[in-house]
Each structure stands twice: as C-alpha cells, then as structure tokens.
Image: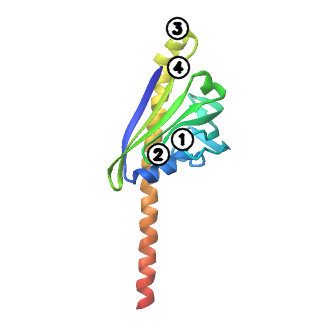
Amino acid sequence: MTRVEATGIVEAPADDLFHFTDWCYNTGWTPFIAKAWIVKLPQSNGLGEVAGMRGMMMGRPIEWQGEVVRHEPGRLWARKAISGLPLKWRMRAEMQLHALEPRSTRVTFAMEYAMPYSIFGWLMDRFYMQKEARKMVQAAVEALGRLAAEEASRRLLISWNVGRKTTQDTS
C-alpha cells in the first residue's frame, strides 16, 4: 500500500474546513474532481455517506463512488472508493485537521492506494503514480488554503462595506 500526503497551514477554523471538505458538493479544493454528487446520505454519526465523483485522476478521465468510513467532526474524515478504477486500486483519502489557533489549522490530506499487476504495478507506481498522487494531494491542500484566504477576504470586504454604509447613513 502506497501512502502520499501533503500538509499545510490554512488560516481558517478547523470546524469550518471540516464542513467545507466533508460534503461532496465542495469540489473547488480538489482540482482533480470536476463534479460530485450525493448518492446516499450519511447516517446520524456521519458514516456511510456515498458520493459519486467525476474528474481527472492520474492523467485519465475517471468516474467513481466513495463512501465515508471515518467521521470525527472538526478533526478527521476518511473516504474509500467503492466503485470504478479507484476501487481496483483500493484507494482511500483522508483529511486530518489540527486546530493551532482559533483561526489557524494544520491540514493533512493523504491518499492511499495499492497498484495491481505485481511487478508491472510496482514499476508503474514507483516511476509514475507516486509522483502524480503527490501532485494531487499537494494541489488539494494549496487550493484549500487559497479558498480559505478568498473567503476571509470576501467576509472582510462585506463587513467593511456594511460598516461603511452604516457610517455614511449616520452622517
């Protein structure tokens, strides 16, 4: 089993990041997923949610479904592939969030997979797949940081405009 991960500091609360990344309709932080949809709603404990996904993975167009297998609100979620090529690779993704300060979170996004085809799979993994998987998880962490910064800027602009309007109204 190969595991690749990327870690970064994101200027946003861990709970906000958890809810932003946990549900499948927020695909902006995963550049390799173009579309996602809910196939099955989660149980009350957050487990069992199934999402369908479509995108580009490892350089090829791909469609698959993933099921939430770990769910610890504000801290961690994990999803495993249950269909498509990622199932054949026994692929699993995991997001860990560690609050550093009220508005700062260490984010670790990891992907695990096992290449089939014995020696050919091992060679393909060693010389191509690991590099591509590392790019994917790194791009996801970087995009999450960018989106959090954009959201913080948007909120600041809204509060500035609201404050400015209130000040102008009282003049």
Q: Residue at x 63, y 25 (%)?
A: 85
Q: Which mark is residue 31?
A: 1
Query: Gap in Å between the C-alphas at discs 1 and 2?
Result: 8 Å
Using the image as rendered, state which of residue 36 and residue 38 is in the foreground. Answer: 38
Query: Gap in Å between the C-alphas at discs 4 and 1?
Result: 22 Å
Do labels 1 and 3 touch, CB within 8 Å?
A: no
Do labels 4 and 1 touch, CB within 8 Å?
A: no
> On screen, 129 above or below 153?
above
| Front: mark 4 or 1 | 4
Query: Badge 1: few (under 14), some or many (20 or more) residues near its Cα, within 10 Å?
Result: some
Looking at the rendered structure, the kind of residue marked 4 is Ala
Which structural element holds mark 2? Answer: helix
| Front: mark 2 or 4 | 4
Which structural element holds mark 4? Answer: loop
Q: Which mark is residue 143?
A: 2
Query: Gap in Å between the C-alphas at discs 3 and 4?
Result: 12 Å
Looking at the rendered structure, the kind of residue marked 2 is Ala
Residue carrying label 4: 114
